[in-house]
Image (spheres, helix red, strand yellow):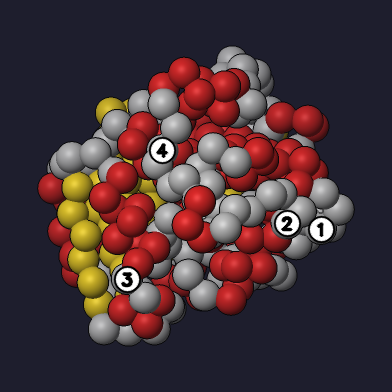
Amino acid sequence: MNKAMCSAVALVFSGSALYAQDEINRTPVDDASFEIIADHFRYDRQMPLEAVTIGEWPHRNPYVIEKVEFSSTHGERVPAYYTHPKDSTDARYPAILLLHGANDFWGKNEDWALDWMDILSREGWCVLVADFYGFGERKNAGQAPSWELSPYLGRAAVVQSVTDQRRGLDYLLSRSEVDTSRVALMGGSMGGYFGTMVAGLEDRFATVVLTVTGAWPPEAATDGGVNRFGHTLNFAPRVSAPILMVNATGDGRELPEELFRAMPEPRKQVWYESDHYLPPRQYNEDIVAWLHEYLD
């Protein structure tokens, strides 16, 4: 993870107790303790989506882009892009829930998300990428991305962020073009951080792809105060779908390898000699091949 990731995630837990290095417990919590954590993320899947299509752009062959919006918890409205193949009236396609990185103003309009939306859509898949809480069109929605008032407000923002993306999954599964048995999650950087939590709480994904992320927050105990609610090491062992992790050597190996070790099988980790930003047009072969393996 890079400095942008640090500012967007580490500050969530500012003010919570950290431990001396030799006392930090980095072991994932047991199942009973995780149930307490998971209780904070529970929501009613039957809550109406109240989805609307604001507009569409049908001219980018071979797929259509729709600008959509749907409801989440606490009255939040979540803006997103949704793509589907043209002439998809009678067919059902695999789908990807794509989680963007920490970029402050841009949200779903960041280059990484738009490039991957195009790459994945051209494979004949449906794609949804939604603005995280406090990003993009939701820039003024709350305290994200630098939740500074207290760790407890940070925890609430993390729960909202995770729930919004799970509502994105609900939206994907509501679309007539989507084959509900072939849905994947893919997240990069901050999207990989939140993606680990989403995947650890869900059983509706066929596979999960996490890029340039790792065990987060660093130097924080998995069982320590507020940290445990947003610690990826607590969610990683609960991921029920096959996992591909793609990492850059420029981020260092310690935290990505720590997260990978906590993941269950089947799993695979790929390393690239690169800095934190892995240009999608250059580094997509392994990811696309992995997705075809589990979505075809």
Residue 221 placed where, x, y %? Answer: 53, 47
Dot 4 crowding, Cα within 10 Å, few <14, some 14–19, many 20+: many
Q: Mark 1 packing: few (<14 Cα in 10 Å), some, or many (20+)?
A: some
Ranked by sequence position, the earlier of labels 1 and 4 is 4
Image coords of residue 17 (percent x, y): 69, 49
Q: Which residue is mark 4?
A: 28
Residue on which disc 3 sits: 253
Residue at image position (27%, 36%) is: 241
N-term-proximal mark, 3 vs 2: 2
- Separation of marks 3 and 1 at Cα, in angstroms: 29 Å
Say if mark 1 contacts mark 2, CB within 8 Å: yes
User: Residue at position x 26%, y 50% from top?
Assistant: 261
Q: Secondary structure at mark 1?
A: loop
- Three-letter amino acid code at the position of disc 4: Pro
Q: Nearer the viewer, residue 36 or 104?
A: 36
- Residue drawn at the location 35% of the way across and 62% of the way down: 256
Are the residues tagged 4 and 3 within 8 Å (C-beta)?
Answer: no
Q: Amino acid at mark 2?
A: Ser
Secondary structure state at the residue bearing disc 4: loop
Amino acid, disc 3: Arg
Q: What residue would you read off at disc 1?
A: 148
- Work out whether residue 247 can be spotted: yes
> Which of the two discs, 1 and 2, labels the residue nearer the N terminus?
2
Q: Position of residue 78 (x, y in %)?
A: 68, 44
Give the image location of residue 59, x and y in percent: 46, 64
Is 238 on the left or on the right of 38, as rendered?
left
